[in-house]
Amino acid sequence: MRIALPDGYAAFVVPRSGLATKHGITIVNSPGTVDAGYRGEIKVTLLNTDARQAYDIAVGDRIAQLIVMPVTRARFIPVDDLPESVRGDGGFGSTGYQQKDGVRA
């Protein structure tokens, strides 16, 4: 499938919930992003998470969903220093749980 999105929009390729729930079929890089300037074929890389059961895909099968949304273009301005924030430079799980003593890990 090929599409031509208008400027200011992007499409996001996401798994179909039924395939994921019933058969363990999902999309490797979900959501896959299609920007407004792209004109090539939209390809979907599927992953079968069920190692015990193969799943056959036929031409015409509905294997993914395409969500089209407006997107805002950010204008970035170089600065020497960033403002402080509660999170700071903590990443990858830094805000996701607390230790038993109440201290965030």
Image: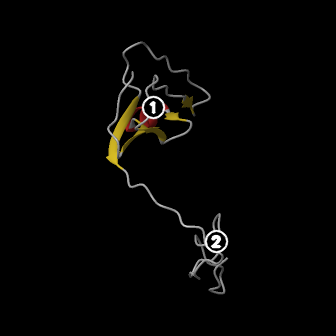
Sequence-first disc among 2 and 1: 1
The foreground one among 87 and 54 is 87
Q: In which quadrant will I find the C terminus?
A: bottom right
- Up/down of 75 relative to 60, above or below: below
**Which image quadrant for residue 96?**
bottom right
Q: State the mark number for residue 38.
A: 1
The foreground one among 17 and 42 is 42
Q: Residues within 10 Å of mark 2 (few under 14, many from 20)?
A: few
For image coordinates 50% across by 41% down, the residue present is 30
The label nearer to you, 2 versus 1, is: 1
The foreground one among 52 and 19 is 19
**Which image quadrant for residue 34?**
top left
User: Could you tell me how far apart the alpha carbons at marks 2 and 1 are, in whole angstroms?
Assistant: 36 Å
The colour scheme of the drawn protein is secondary structure
Residue that carries the numbered disc 2 in the rendered image: 94
Q: Amino acid at mark 2?
A: Ser
